Amino acid sequence: MRAVRLGPRSVAALALVSAIGAVAFGWPLFAPGDSGITTHAADAPWLFAALLPLLLAVVVATIADTGLDAKAVAMLGVLAAAGAALRPLGAGTAGIEPMFFLMVLSGRVLGPGFGFVLGAVSMFASALLTGGVGPWMPFQMLAMGWVAMGAGLLPGAARLRGRAETLLLAGYGAVASVAYGTVMNLQGWTLMQGMASGISYVPGDPLDENLARFVAYCLATSLGWDLPRAVVTMVLTLTLGGAILKALRRATRRAAFEAPVAFEAPVAFEAPAAFEDR
């Protein structure tokens, strides 16, 4: 049972914002040197910040398209608040970010639609909580939405249970943690263009050369955070995942998000026989 199902309009909106996000993340690898966009590489984060209303529109469209009721909104608020509260615990120190495992588990139980909404809203709430509002925030919202949505798209949601499911989610969480850091690196890498370094972005260089620089940039700057984040996510999933999965599924069953509402005609009042004789 899933709180948010992806309807046709939601799928279209999500595909659109994901396509735009993929272009916004990856354009430095493909833009030619004489392109006007390369002269404004430092402005790319600010330009992408204009996509924040579009991300919020996807959230609203998903809610409107699926008829999200008050119980599902309440669960979304609780999980988003929990995720936002978990993020500052590590403050990003050495990759200790415990919110990732909660996003993965929630996306697994409640589906890809709920996962994307939860990931984006949780990152938005944590940014407000920690004062991390900036041009990078829409990137973080989109990337975290992809992480949680991917967990909802994993196979075996209806049948796979127990240790096998926990191992699957732990493996996915580790890969998603590293992928999140790698994708987010594209947001800041373009700011290093023109620096005399083997890891800086060079507008217009061939794809293989810029890609090699980007790999070197990731190894030099973020791998020390990405790998610990993956380890923390795996450990938390393996130790707490089973209990949290059961709690989320129990809460979803009791909430009965998809229970149909039926209205019955009122039963006609029949007078007792004693009144009819009179």
Image (cartoon, helix red, strand yellow):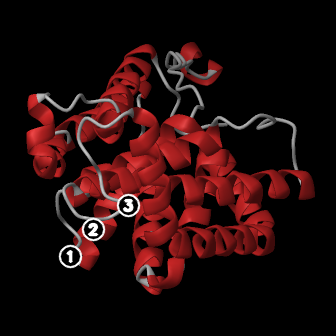
* Residue 266 visible in the shown view: yes
**Figure quadrant of residue 173:** bottom right
Relative depth, front residue between 204 and 93:
204
Percent across and percent down for residue 203 are 23, 41
Q: How busy is the neighbourhood of tag 3: few (under 14 within 10 Å), some, or many (20 plus)?
A: some
Relative depth, front residue between 81 and 223:
223
Label 1 with label 2: CB-CB less than 8 Å: yes
Q: How busy is the neighbourhood of tag 1: few (under 14 within 10 Å), some, or many (20 plus)?
A: few
Where is mark 3, residue-wise? 198
How far apart are labels 1 and 2 at the CA level?
6 Å
The three-letter amino acid code for the residue at tag 3 is: Gly
- Horizontal placement of 188 versus 113: left or right? left
Q: Earlier in the sequence, mark 3 or mark 1?
A: 1
Where is mark 1, residue-wise? 131
Q: Residue at 80%, 51% (x, y): give it.
A: 168
Percent across and percent down for residue 7 are 46, 19
Count the marks: how many?
3
Foreground tag (2 vs 3):
3
Q: How busy is the neighbourhood of tag 2: few (under 14 within 10 Å), some, or many (20 plus)?
A: some
Percent across and percent down for residue 68 are 42, 36
- Horizontal placement of 100 versus 81: left or right? right
How far apart are labels 3 and 1 at the CA level?
33 Å
* Residue 144 visible in the shown view: no
The three-letter amino acid code for the residue at tag 1 is: Gly
The three-letter amino acid code for the residue at tag 2 is: Ala
Where is mark 2, residue-wise? 127
Which mark, residue 169? none
